[in-house]
Amino acid sequence: MLLERPADNDPSRVNNKELVQLPLIKDTAPNEQAALVIEKIVQCQHVFDFYAPVAQLKCKEIKRTALNERIDHITSTKGAIVETIKQLLDLFDSEDPRERDFLKTVLHRIYGKFLGLRAFIRKHINNMFLRFVYETDSFNGVGELLEILGSIINGFALPLKQEHKVFLVKVLLPLL
C-alpha cells in the first residue's frame, strides 16, 4: 500500500510516497488474497528515478519483491489472472489501431512468458473468432489476433494436436 506523508495535493509530491512491505500472498487467507494482490499491483505502479541509483533503495526493493511475488503467484496459482487476461483480450475490439497494436505486443509477451496461460489464451481467441464468424460479424481486432495466431501456429509441433485441427476447421477456415 502507498502511504503518503502528510502533504497537500501538490502533484510534485508524487515521488515522496513511501512503499510499505506488505505480507506475502501465500501467507494470507484465501479470502483476503485478491485485495492484497490489488495492493501489490498498486505498489508496482510506483515509478522510481533510476538516474539516482541509491535513492529510495528500500522502496525499490519492496517493489522488486512485489513484482517477483506477483510472477510467482500468477505462475503457481490456477486461475490467478484468468478473468483479467479475458478482459485484456476483449480490449482488441477497440476502434483505435494503435491500442490494438500495443495489445498485440502485450499479449504476445504474456503468451511467451506464461506457459500455463497458453491454452486459456488460445481458447479465448478461439471463442472470440467463433463469436465473430457465427454471431456478430463485427470485431475490430480480427487482424491483430490473426497476426498473433500466425506466430503461435508457427510454434506448433507436429503432429498437430486435436485442439489445433479443430481450431483450423471450425475457426480459421470459416474466416475465409
Image (cartoon, rainbow, N blue to C red):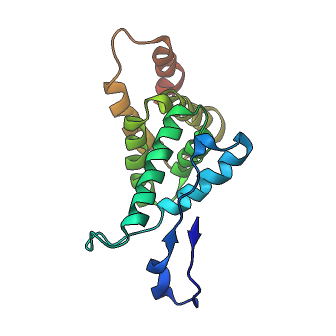
Residue that appears at 53% across and 59% down: 21
Q: Please, is residue 157 above or below residue 72 in the view?
A: above
- Residue 61 in picture, x, y percent from top left: 40, 59
Task: Judge whether residue 97 can be spotted in this image.
Answer: no
Residue that appears at 41% across and 48% down: 106
- Residue 9 in picture, x, y percent from top left: 58, 88
Along the line of sight, the residue nearer the viewer: 77 or 116: 77
Q: How many tags in the picture?
A: 0
Q: Please, is residue 108 above or below residue 157 in the view?
A: below
Along the line of sight, the residue nearer the viewer: 124 or 69: 69
With 36 as the anchor, is 102 left or right in this view? left
Quadrant that contains the C terminus: top left
- Residue 41 in picture, x, y percent from top left: 54, 56
Quadrant that contains the N terminus: bottom right
With 126 as the anchor, is 115 left or right in this view? left
- Residue 70 in picture, x, y percent from top left: 50, 46
